[in-house]
Amino acid sequence: MLDILTTKWQKTQDYTAELLGIMDLYFNDKCAISEEEKKRVSYLCNILSLQESPKGKFNEEFNIQLGSIRSFFLNNTNIKVSYIDFYVAFKMNCWYLIDHRLNEINRSLELGEIVSLPKIEPYKVAPEHI
């Protein structure tokens, strides 16, 4: 069971790193996104969303952010908040998620049984930036 948690943690880290990399390239270099890249963004958002069912504040906010990213890339529309603020909030939530999973793995190893840590709070864009 611990192998499953470790694999899930690693895949989450890989998927978020790839998605953040695409976001960096698109927004920082202002390059055009290809149809293939749009499909990849959609896939990455969907797989991360399916790993985090929208139960609880963190998972709900994370899924909303993934939906905004997917919509932006697929429709070539603008995210309603400034990119910097949105990106910081999303990136912080990626870190929270990855760290939380790793902490659960480490705690499970310490106790010798699978444990679930308390839910984490999401990082959100401040209302004045919306």
Image: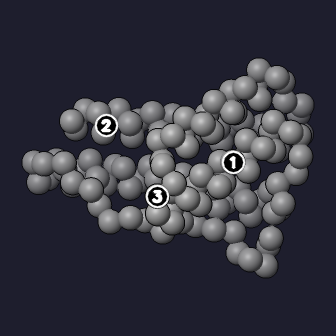
- Which mark identifies residue 26? none
Closer to the eye: label 2 or 1:
1
Quarter of the rendering occupied by the N terminus? top left
Q: Is residue 123 above or below residue 106?
A: below
> Counting residues from the N terminus, which is met first, the one under dot 3 or under dot 2?
2
Q: Mark 3 highlights which residue?
A: 55
Q: Quadrant of residue 119?
A: bottom left
> Counting residues from the N terminus, which is met first, the one under dot 2 or under dot 1?
2
In this picture, residue 7 sits left or right of residue 26: left
> Counting residues from the N terminus, which is met first, the one under dot 1 or under dot 3?
3
Q: Amino acid at mark 3?
A: Lys
Q: Residue at x 79, y 79 (%)?
A: 128
Q: Amino acid at mark 2?
A: Thr
**Would residue 13 be visible to someone looking at this image?**
no
Residue 126 image offset from top left, x and y in percent: 70, 75
Closer to the eye: label 1 or 3:
3
- Which mark identifies residue 67? 1
In this picture, residue 51 sits left or right of residue 91: left
Quarter of the rendering occupied by the C terminus? bottom right
In this picture, residue 68 sits left or right of residue 101: right
Label 1 Cα neighbours within 10 Å, binned few <14 / some 14-19 / many ≥20: some
- Which mark identifies residue 6? 2
Q: Residue at x 81, y 36 (%)?
A: 74
Residue 96 image offset from top left, x and y in percent: 47, 58
Determine the secondary structure under disc 1: helix
Label 2 Cα neighbours within 10 Å, binned few <14 / some 14-19 / many ≥20: some
Determine the secondary structure under disc 2: helix
Find the residue positioned furthest to the top: 36
Determine the secondary structure under disc 3: loop
Alpha carbon separation for disc pair 2 and 1: 26 Å
